[in-house]
Image: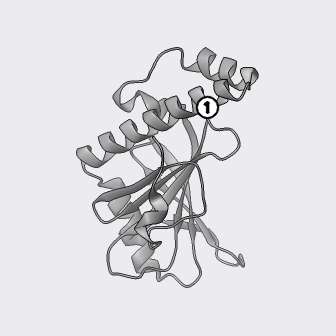
Amino acid sequence: MEIIKIINAKSDLFIDGIFYAPLFDREIKINIDPDVDMKYAEMCAEHFNNLSEKMVDEFCEMAINYCEFMREGWADFGYDDIVTEINKAIPNRLKGREVLKFISDPQMYIEPPEENIPGYSITSNCIWEPEHQLEWIIKGNRNLYVGEVRGLNAWDNESEYECDY
């Protein structure tokens, strides 16, 4: 069964589509590199829709750590307006899956694979990083990276995924 609905197959950069993502309880945009086989794209969307509870919980904890790191960072650099917005929306440290309520406009990106396993990234807006958003990179059954969007994908050198939080 096809779960991806193609919206625009004529884009130069990506094939644009949507699919329903139960984790976010809505349809999300999917951006597929034109060199990616649609069967592989379907496999990635299906994989995302069937992530283990452990992977989702790990992502949420990593996203919370990123949120707190940025809250402190904005304060250290004197960006009081951003800190005020974060504190108004998120007065206390989030717990578990509460963080999902503060993620908006998630989009999946699928690059050409280097192995026959699902590898993709999810980017989204988040209140704690209005400039660089949130990126979640998944390969197989591993969360490789959660942090600011840095233009990475699931096939980059794993040393690229290191972060300070």
Of residues 123 and 157, the one nearer the viewer is 157
Q: Which quadrant holds residue 80?
A: top right
Of residues 108 and 96, the one nearer the viewer is 96
Above or below for 152 versus 22: below
- Amino acid carrying label 1: it is Gly
Of residues 116 and 159, the one nearer the viewer is 159
The residue sitting at 35% across, 63% down in the picture is 46
The residue sitting at 54% across, 65% down in the picture is 152
Above or below for 74 versus 19: above
Q: For the C terminus, which image quadrant?
A: top left
Say how the picture is coloured.
Answer: one colour
The residue sitting at 45% across, 55% down in the picture is 162
The residue sitting at 62% across, 45% down in the picture is 133
Whether residue 127 is visible = yes
Whether residue 2 is visible = no
Residue 129 image point, x, y percent: 63, 38
Residue 125 image point, x, y percent: 61, 42
Residue 112 image point, x, y percent: 49, 80
Q: Secondary structure at mark 1?
A: helix
Number of marks drawn: 1
Q: For the N terminus, which image quadrant?
A: bottom left
Q: Is residue 103 left or right of residue 23?
A: right
Which residue in the protein does label 1 denote?
A: 73
Q: Which quadrant holds residue 62?
A: top left
Above or below for 131 versus 74: below
Residue 120 image point, x, y percent: 45, 65
Mark 1 burial class by Cα count in 10 Å: few <14, some 14-19, many 20+ = few
